[in-house]
Image: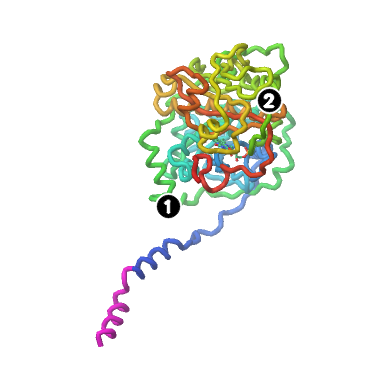
Amino acid sequence: MQEHVSLVYDIVHPPQAERDALYFWRQMALVATPESAPPRIPVPAALRPALSLFEAASEGSVNGGPSVPSAGALYPYEHFAIVGGPDDPAVFAVDVARRTCRLLYDREQVAQALERGGIALPGPDAYLILTVVRPWLSMRKYDDRGYLYAQLDAAHLGAHLLCLGSRSHHRAEWLTRAATAPLAELFGLGDRCRFLHSVLLLDGPAHARTPSPSTQAWSCTDERHMSPGAPPGDLPEGQSWRRLAVYRQEPPVRSAAVRRGALMPGSRDEPDRRCRPGGAELAARAVRRRSAKEFAAGDLPARALQDALTALATPLTTDLPPSDGFGATLVARRVVGLIPGTYPVLGGEIAAEPTGTAVADDDDIVRMCMGQEHLRHTCAAVVFHARHQEIFGLGMAGVEQALLRAGALAHLLCLSATDTGIAITTIGGFDAGRWHALAGIPGENEVLYVALLGVTGASAVKLDRLQRAYAHDER
Ligand SMILES: Cc1cc2nc3c(=O)[nH]c(=O)nc-3n(C[C@H](O)[C@H](O)[C@H](O)COP(=O)(O)O)c2cc1C
């Protein structure tokens, strides 16, 4: 009798475990959008030059997107293109890997947002490429440090697109301090946990106006009237966004002026006697660029190392201000022709004499790189750093600017090393304090980023790309 009562009770009031299971089962379900598929439209002719640029940017890529280094190969960003000239601008979200674009906004609302930011399209052939960061993609693997990686990743991408753009356009400018708040507001980026990193302005195609035939593969839909979807709430997007919101600053209210010059202090802006490649020539190497998966035991010749480092003096057209407090220091371990020690790299030139002779053994290197065994035989490192006051004096905007400069310079180095037979990988998994001490950097400086150089090893697997955070000593 007792048993029977309990059974009835269970049916009328399911136990908590059953209710929980049912709830979570429903949480796990997918629900297709009730709207019909967005209408397909022809790819507008004005968009094709932007698509050609993305096609070029993806040559050599293993995942279909732009071919650039990315921490853990997470590529935490997406792209927008604004095309159509000053009178009829339209915004397209561009998915490079899928070769699709979505028309999102057009006409007055876009023109006004551009106008308010002082970045209106200058003519009918001009267009803008916007890099929008999705920080949670890095932060869910690497916690707060993932934000630093997202900034560095976007800097690599921006430098890549700028070099390519300067090859195919008369005017290519990387706007890193533009007044983008009106655009971000129009796109609802904050509500969708994204932020606008930077803008590339391109004008006057240097070659014939016929875009590359490969852009025929692209398709386009009109999504101007579709809802952006539910806000992310407690999902990882929302969690990491709330973590950042306290620290992030609004974009500037006025766009900064653009100038052409090297991002590295101490560089000569006039062409020097040696035949050093410009950004456009470096861009051609992106197709073959790869990050080293492992270094083999061996030495590097000083000459090849110097050749690679000259790329740090490449002039670029950006709105970044000069930065006297920024520096790069070479840590030479096994370089034929250089006494082991530390050498300032002013304007891409290795100093004639070392400023310090501290050395690290192979075990130290692995430890300083958070247990990354594949970096044991590093021959040399380039440590990018900047003065404390210059970074933090501007709040998070200063941090982001310093990371942008370091990431862009590291990118030029990755490209230039491609030709010299030097294996290179930039790393984010490093102990800044230990690298600071090894490189003998002045106390008021902060280490931002490190590039390691050496001899190509045999491994075919890039460990930090795997699911575990191996670059953070996770076992
Ligand atoms: C910000 C950043 C941090 C990185 N950190 C590491 C690292 O700690 N260790 C490593 O071996 N590679 C690191 N990499 C290299 C990436 O693993 C590599 O770029 C990615 O796997 C894509 O491969 P690819 O550069 O050959 O295209 C880093 C790259 C970037 C941009």
For the residue marked with disc 2, what is the amino acid?
Leu
Give the percent coordinates (x, y) of residue 177: 49, 26
Determine if the magenta segment contains residue 46.
no
Of marks 1 and 2, the one in the foreground:
2
Seen from this angle, which residue lies furthest bottom?
A: 1
- 389 vs 453, nearest the viewer: 453
* For residue 238, side relative to residue 308 (left or right): left
Q: Residue at x 67, y 44 (%)?
A: 460
Q: Is residue 46 visible?
A: no
Res 315 quadrant in image: top right
Q: What is the C-alpha distance between the residues marked 1 and 2?
A: 54 Å
* For residue 194, side relative to residue 281 (left or right): left
**Residue tagged by mark 2?**
300
Q: Residue at x 67, y 28 (%)?
A: 417
Magenta residues?
Answer: 1-16
On residue 230, the disc is 1
Res 165 quadrant in image: top right
For the residue marked with disc 1, what is the amino acid?
Ala
